[in-house]
Image (cartoon, rainbow, N blue to C red):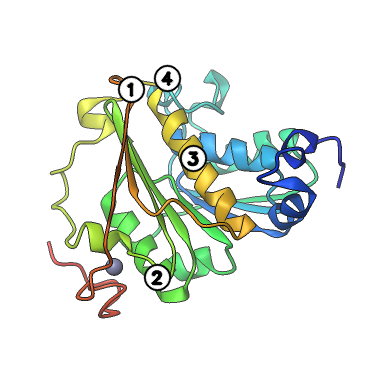
Amino acid sequence: MNQERYSRQTLLKEIGEGGQTKISAAKAVIVGCGALGTYTASLLTRAGVGRILIADRDNVELSNLQRQILFSEQDVGEPKASTAERLLKQVNSEIEITSTMTDIGVDNVEDLVDGATVVVDATDNMQTRFVVNDACVKLGIPWVYGGAVGTSGMVFSIVPTGPCLRCVFPTLPPAGQLPTCNTVGIVNSLPSVVASLEVTEALKVMLGEKTTPELMIIDVWHGDLQKIRVKRNPDCESCGKRHYYAYDR
Ligand SMILES: [Zn+2]
C-alpha cells in the first residue's frame, strides 16, 4: 500500500494508520449505481476500501448526467456498473473493484452481500431496500440505508444490535406511492450530501466504531439536518420475528 495516497486520512485521528489497515481489509458492497452509487463508490474507492462490489441493473441515460457524477455523454447507453468499475480502477488501481449488472431480488441478494463488511444502499426503491435489509439482518451484516428525492434525503445505519429498516418502515409502501426522482425530480446538490453521510457511516463500520444511532433526515434546500431516535421493535417482522422476505403491502 502506498502510504502517500492515504496520508491525509491516516493523519486524521479518527482513522490513523491502524484505521487505514482496517479499511484496506474491508469489503463494501454498493447496491445501485445511480447518484448515490456513483458518489459512494467514488469516495470508498478513494478511501482505499480493499474490495468493492458495485451492483446495478441499468444503463446510463442522458437524464442521469445531471447528478450521477461518474458518467459522461460517451457513457450513455453503457451499463452503469461496469462503466463505474472501469472509471474507478483509473482512480485507484491498488484495490479490487468488481461489478455486476443484476436486478437484485430475494434469489440473489444473499450471494451479493456475502462477505461484505458493510453494504451501502444506493438503490432508488423500497422493494430492493427491504430485500437488502432482510438479507443483512439475517446474515448479521451492517448496512447503511440512504435515500434522496426532491430536496431531502435520509440516512440510517443498520447494525445487528440495533433497529432495522423494518422497525422504521414496517410495511412496504405500494409501488408508485412514494415519490421518486422520476416523478418529482431531484436537486443535483442533494446526492453528494446523502452519499457523504452514508460513506462516513460505512467507514465507521469498517473501523469498528459506533455508527450514528439516529435516522438522519437532511433537507439541502433549507439547510436542515434532523436526527430522529429509532427504537428496535420487538415485533418487527425482520429483526424481531425473523420472517424474512415476506412483505405485507
Ligand atoms: Zn427490525
Q: Label 4's element? A: loop
Mark 4, Cα crowd under 10 Å, few <14 / some 14-19 / many 20+, is some
| Residue in the foreground of this view, choosing between 7 and 11 | 11
Disc 1 target residue: 223
Residue denoted by label 2: 137
Which residue is at a point 53% across and 34% down the rendered structure image?
A: 39
For label 1, the SS is: loop
Amino acid type at circle 4 is Gln
Q: Which residue is mark 3?
A: 37
202 to 236, vertically: above or below: above
- Tell me the kind of residue under disc 1: Gly
| Residue in the image at 20% along x and 30% along y | 183
Residue 222 in the image: above or below residue 245: above
Of the residues shown, which amino acid type is indicated by label 2? Answer: Val
Q: Nearer the viewer, mark 2 or mark 1?
A: 1
Residue mark closest to the camera, 2 vs 3: 2
Ligand 1 closer than 8 Å to the CB at disc 2?
yes
